Image: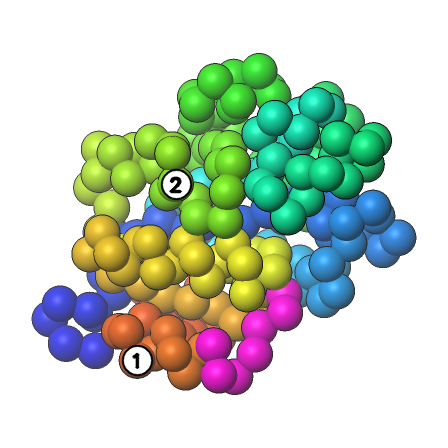
């Protein structure tokens, strides 16, 4: 790490990506292998950021029943009736382990309108319609308003949304931390490629110690 890529804990935010019941729970309609097993490490990160009073943003998917906002590879299935992260369903909710309160629920209407739903003192939920958390969202402006220049990423399905989000963040000159053990379907070559573009790769323990130092 050099002066341009070195992550700064005092200006860091944590992004959790798509850690919702339909992608996580065993037997769920769109279960992603390995996500449930990674949830304890995600929770460790979330709790560390909460303890450090650092921003946490949970990025979620919401698929309308008519498929109108669904990415092309899943749109036909949703149009034919597949109920995946449908607004207002339990499958669309964050997994209990990451919720700031057990009774916390998503306000789908606000999220689909592009608003950030506050979930805690320094914790929010936002909606994305595609792989990147920056695509067609207000995330960049939201982070800038809070003085964030370092993004820590964990969550569901590394080859798709976490990886795309990190490349999009790199294009916007964010300093980056990736936590493989807190992300499902991570593979060595992909992690090496992230390191090649200046991403700092840390374990959950290292990240928790770093943000609370």
Is residue 82 among the parts visible in the rendering?
yes
- Image: 3 above or below 86: below
Instruction: Say what secondary structure mark 1 lies in.
Output: helix
Task: Give the residue at x 57% y 73%.
Answer: 186
Query: Which range of residues does the magenta coloring cover?
Result: 184-190
Q: Nearer the viewer, residue 82 or 170?
A: 82
Is residue 188 magenta-colored? yes
Task: Give the residue at x 30% y 33%.
Answer: 142
**Quarter in which the N terminus is drawn:** bottom left
Task: Give the residue at x 24% y 46%.
Answer: 148
Residue designated by label 2: 135
Instruction: Say what secondary structure mark 2 lies in.
Output: loop
Indicate the position of residue 118 as horizontal and vertical percent values.
47, 25
Q: Nearer the viewer, residue 71 or 93?
A: 71
- Image: 86 above or below 157: above
Q: Earlier in the sequence, mark 1 or mark 2?
A: 2
Q: Nearer the viewer, residue 206 or 164?
A: 164
Indicate the position of residue 36 as horizontal and vertical percent values.
74, 59
Is residue 106 among the parts visible in the rendering?
no
Residue designated by label 1: 196
């Amino acid at each position: 790490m050099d002066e341009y890529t070195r992550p700064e804990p005092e200006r860091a935010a944590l992004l959790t990506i798509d850690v919702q019941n339909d992608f996580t729970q065993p037997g769920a309609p769109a279960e992603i292998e390995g996500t449930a097993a990674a949830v304890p490490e995600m929770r460790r990160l979330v709790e560390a950021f909460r303890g450090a009073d650092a921003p946490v943003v949970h990025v979620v998917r919401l698929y309308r029943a008519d498929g109108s906002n669904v990415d092309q590879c899943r749109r036909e299935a949703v149009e034919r009736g597949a109920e995946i992260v449908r607004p207002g369903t339990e499958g669309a909710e964050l997994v209990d382990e990451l919720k700031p309160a057990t009774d916390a629920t998503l306000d789908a209407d606000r999220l689909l309108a592009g608003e950030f739903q506050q979930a805690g003192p320094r914790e929010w939920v936002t909606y994305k319609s595609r792989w990147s958390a920056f695509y067609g969202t207000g995330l960049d402006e939201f982070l800038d308003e809070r003085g964030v220049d370092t993004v820590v990423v964990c969550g569901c399905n590394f080859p798709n949304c976490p990886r795309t989000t990190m490349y999009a963040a790199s294009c916007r000159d964010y300093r980056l931390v990736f936590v493989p053990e807190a992300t499902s379907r991570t593979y060595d070559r992909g992690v090496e490629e992230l390191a090649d573009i200046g991403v700092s790769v840390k374990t959950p323990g290292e990240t928790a110690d770093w943000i609370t130092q």
